[in-house]
């Protein structure tokens, strides 16, 4: 007697005799439908895009897989840009940001730095804002991070937060960002830290 799968059946193997063979055959068919490799052209495009963003391919692929979309913005903390008491970033960081193609270069400046001074001293940045302080509530942190992202017309899921202090990791959650990278991870390619 053959049993026909009813409405809502997931199409997996039935539970009647011969289950082991049917399970093996079903999993083999599933694997054949879902290739383990991506096409060469897609890989080449992603390698190029990773280079345009100043990321290594492995990092870019992980961010893209997690978020499900391309990276359209990079949000740096002033700590990540080495802006310690001065508004102008070091040459190595500035050169790395100049090479970024097709993504907004955003920065949140920690006090006593003023966003307008950071923007004036670093024309490579597309937008700057005031960074929240560690004593700010969650709502204020979210407002600061999402504010600069949305002001550029970006979705948080298309932005990678790059920081250099433990509390800056929270910015990725507050901004609903695609990922968080430490400055060391990001700049090891472009600025050779």
Image: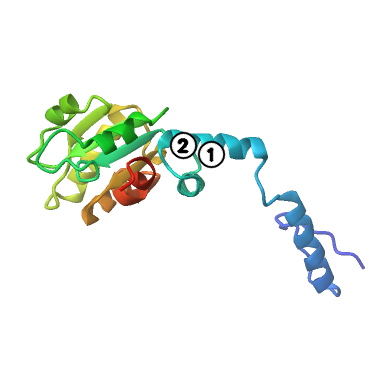
Relative image position of residue 166 (x, y in whole percent): 23, 56
Relative image position of residue 104 (x, y in whole percent): 34, 30
Q: CA distance from mark 2 to mark 1?
A: 6 Å
Which residue occupies 50% across, 45% down? 57
Quadrant in the picture for residue 151 = top left
Is residue 81 visible from the viewing direction of this image? yes
Q: Nearer the viewer, residue 92 or 126?
A: 92
For mark 1, does the 10 Å Cα neighbourhood hold few (<14), some (14 to 19), or many (20 or more) residues?
A: some
Q: Is residue 55 left or right of residue 89?
A: right
- Residue pointed to by mark 2: 51
Which structural element holds mark 2? Answer: helix
- Residue pointed to by mark 1: 47
Is residue 70 visible from the viewing direction of this image? no
- Say above or below: 79 vs 9: above
Relative image position of residue 98 (x, y in whole percent): 33, 29
Q: Nearer the viewer, residue 6 or 82?
A: 82
Q: Nearer the viewer, residue 184 or 150?
A: 184
Which residue occupies 11% across, 52% down? 135
Q: Name the disc covering residue 17, or none.
A: none
- The single residue placed furthest to the bottom in the displayed view is 17
Which residue occupies 45% across, 48% down? 59
Q: Is residue 77 left or right of residue 187?
A: left
Which structural element holds mark 1? Answer: helix
- The single residue placed furthest to the right in the displayed view is 1
For mark 2, does the 10 Å Cα neighbourhood hold few (<14), some (14 to 19), or many (20 or more) residues?
A: some
- Say above or below: 35 vs 28: above
Residue contact at pointers 2 and 1, CB within 8 angstroms: yes
- Say above or below: 189 vs 104: below
Relative image position of residue 134 (x, y in whole percent): 14, 52
């Amino acid at each position: 007697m053959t049993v026909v799968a009813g409405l809502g059946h997931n199409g997996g193997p039935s539970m009647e005799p011969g289950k082991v063979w049917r399970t093996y055959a079903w999993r083999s068919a599933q694997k054949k439908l879902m290739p383990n490799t991506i096409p060469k052209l897609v890989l080449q495009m992603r390698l190029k895009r990773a280079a345009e963003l100043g990321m290594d391919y492995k990092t870019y692929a992980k961010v893209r897989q997690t978020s499900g979309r391309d990276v359209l913005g990079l949000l740096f903390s002033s700590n990540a840009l080495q802006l310690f008491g001065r508004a102008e970033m070091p040459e190595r960081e500035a050169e790395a940001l100049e090479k970024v193609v097709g993504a907004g270069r955003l920065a949140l400046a920690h006090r006593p730095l003023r966003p307008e001074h950071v923007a004036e001293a670093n024309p490579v940045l597309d937008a700057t804002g005031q960074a929240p302080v560690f004593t700010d509530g969650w709502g204020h942190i979210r407002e600061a991070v999402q504010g600069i992202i949305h002001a550029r017309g970006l979705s948080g899921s298309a932005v990678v937060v790059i920081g250099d202090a433990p509390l800056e990791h929270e910015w990725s959650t507050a901004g609903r960002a695609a990922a968080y990278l430490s400055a060391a991870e990001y700049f090891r390619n472009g600025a050779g830290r």
